[in-house]
Image: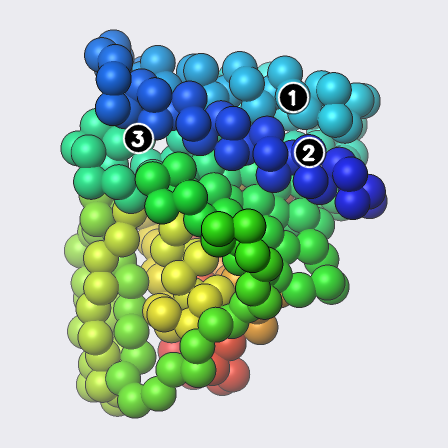
Amino acid sequence: MLSQKQISDIIRLIEDAGKEILNVYYHKEFNTRIKKDNSPVTIADLSSDNIIKSGLAEITPGISVISEETKEIDFEVRSQWNPVWILDPLDGTKEFISKNNEFCISLALIFDHQPVAGFIHAPVSSETWVAFKENGAYKIIEGKKILLPLFTPSWAYRITISRSHYIESEAAWIEKLKEQHDVIITVQGSAIKFCRIAEGISDIYPKFGLINEWDIAAGHLIVEESGGNVIEMLSHCPPVYNKKSYFQPPFAAFGFRIKEWEKLI
């Protein structure tokens, strides 16, 4: 669906947006304000949003963009958009404000309600993760492409929880898991959690609280194409995108070594 030139241009685009995010991060006032949904937004979110949407209009003309920062689009209109980009121009704004480096850009191309291309870029570490439906996933670091997963885990299940949005029901689920498995807990902000699962550094990421499509679409595909699964807890099916509601029901992401995820949910 995307040519090699378009893919290269998109990777360069999100890297450029990442540089602007860092320019704000290190050198400017954030000008933080609280949106209607009580989530924070900074000038870095808005600058990245503008850079990426303008770039996508040139690279993939005719494909509309649903972004966290410009999401108020009637469903009757956007339901006709196929394919469509789903963008979080700065995922982990709370981590950005806290200056803990755990934030990223998340971009996914959706076709028939499923991600077919996913891009995540972590500006501070200059890591980029990319996946294409039925064509695998890889990481780009220092100009080198490395196929995912990177590691073959053993022994305890390593469960990654959200640094800023961990809730009681997730803790209860993990406690139940501990009854049958050795477990190690790690903490990570933003959609980088999906990338650590894709790499083999982590095994499971449970998310039962408030989260939206743009938070997970790219990470969903990166995990799947590295051999893992992202599964909704109630339906036991993968998430779908560009729904009437942007809200994503509770789910868990499982790394490639967990073959019998049905026994864990």
- Can residue 87 be seen? no
Q: Amino acid at mark 1?
A: Gly
Residue 9, label in figure: 2
Between marks 2 and 3 in the image, the one whose residue lies nearer the viewer: 2
**Quarter of the figure with the N terminus:** top right
Q: Residue 37 in the image: state x and y as whole percent.
A: 33, 22
For label 2, the crowd category at 10 Å Cα-Cα, with few meaning under 14, some 14 to 19 and many 20 or more, is some
Residue 107, picture quadrant: top right
**Quarter of the figure with the C terminus:** bottom left
148 relative to 25 in the view: left or right: right
Residue at the image position 65 percent from the left and 21 percent from the top = 55
64 relative to 175 in the view: left or right: right
Q: Say which residue label 1 marks.
A: 55
Q: Amino acid at mark 3?
A: Thr
Q: Say which residue label 3 marks.
A: 93
Q: Are marks 3 and 1 in contact (CB under 8 Å)?
A: no
Q: Residue 86 in the image: state x and y as whole percent.
A: 59, 34
Q: Earlier in the sequence, mark 2 or mark 1?
A: 2
Measure the alpha-carbon separation of dots 2 and 1. 9 Å
- Can residue 241 be seen? yes
